[in-house]
Amino acid sequence: MKKPNFLVAGVAKCGTTSLFYYLEQHPEICIPKKETFFFIADRYKNPSTHERGRRDPSRIIFDPTEYDSIYERCTEKGIGEISTCYAYYYKEAIPRIKEKLGDPRIIIIIRQPVERLISGYKHFLRMNREHLSLQEALNEEKKRETDRWDFMWQYRGVGFYADAIEAYQKSFSHVKVILQEDLTNKPDECLKELFQFIGVDDQYTPDTSIKYNISDPQSNNKWTNIFLRIKKLKALLKPFTKKNNSDKTKSKIKHRFRKPNQDDMFKASSELQNELLEIYKEDIKRVEKLIQRNLSHWLIKK
């Protein structure tokens, strides 16, 4: 039976979507579905009663047989899954991963936590799903967790990485932690290391020209306004795109036109950013030791 021999365990808003599209280009890698949520699926059997806080259940694989079936066609050396949730829910995910997959290679991608927090907040702003100010949303985190909102609404909580990294390092033989900034600034070098880690040809160079899932609002992006926000045009094009393009192709087209927004309406105050940095300081220092990487630049106050 085919099953993943590597797994990207997160973290959300740290470049996992870009990483998926870069890795899956490799001719020796098969990632048939980006996120399955399979190893924490039990958490979604009792979804939140709040519509905005729920994750679409059609995107979650609950059935082990269905999970197995998506890998049946894989014949490549590297068979993988990329999910954003397995780091945050590491206590639940790790024992299920071990039971199902044994000792796969684990990849975790992380980002300066205050930047990640702001990106997570802007992600829901862009989708018109977050209606609170950032400070108000931070104040609501505990209540949202109690009400079973999806983990991505834990803007502050998702940015604590040390416990998850340590748990994965203790539970699996091969764990590699990479930085989102490396994937962005030196993608070829970063991916070469990942290909070596996965055990596939490291001479392959994928197309990394598209940056996926940018959180910035796109109201000032003329291409977005033309192609993505004109409802009549979307309605006319939908039957054609649905029939003639795969989900991956449509996603690549969409993300190619999405750009960072230098005129973003939302700006977190320096005071709030510094306050948040203080919260993360000890966790960042722990991460430094765990991954043996200098993260002093993450501790510089704005």
Image (tube, helix red, strand yellow):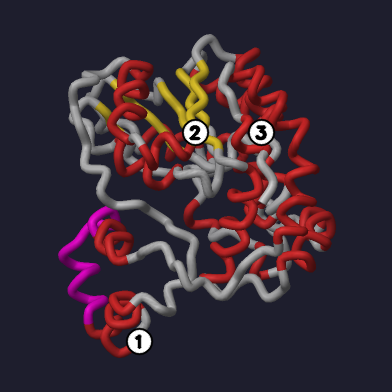
Q: Position of residue 296 (x, y in %)?
A: 63, 30
Between residues 68 and 252, which one lies in front from this camera angle? 252
Q: Position of residue 28 (x, y in %)?
A: 22, 25
Mark 1 nearby-residue class (10 Å; few <14, some 14–19, many ≥20): few
Determine which of the numbered discs, if any, sits on residue 179 in the image.
2
Q: Is residue 245 magenta?
A: yes
Q: Nearer the viewer, mark 2 or mark 1?
A: 2
Between residues 190 and 82, which one lies in front from this camera angle? 190
Q: Which residue is mark 1?
A: 231
Amino acid type, callout 2: Leu
Q: Earlier in the sequence, mark 1 or mark 3?
A: 3
Amino acid type, callout 3: Tyr
Q: Measured along the vertical axis of the image, is residue 258 above or below residue 230?
A: above
Residue displayed at 79% across by 43% down: 278
Determine which of the numbered discs, if any, sits on residue 8 in the image.
none
Residue 75 falls left or right of residue 167: left
Q: Measured along the vertical axis of the image, is residue 51 above or below residue 138?
A: below
As drawn, which residue projects farthest toward the bottom?
232
Q: Which residue is mark 3?
A: 161
Amino acid type, callout 1: Lys
Between marks 2 and 3, how big is the CA–CA gap?
A: 12 Å
Between marks 1 and 3, how big is the CA–CA gap?
A: 40 Å
Mark 3 nearby-residue class (10 Å; few <14, some 14–19, many ≥20): many
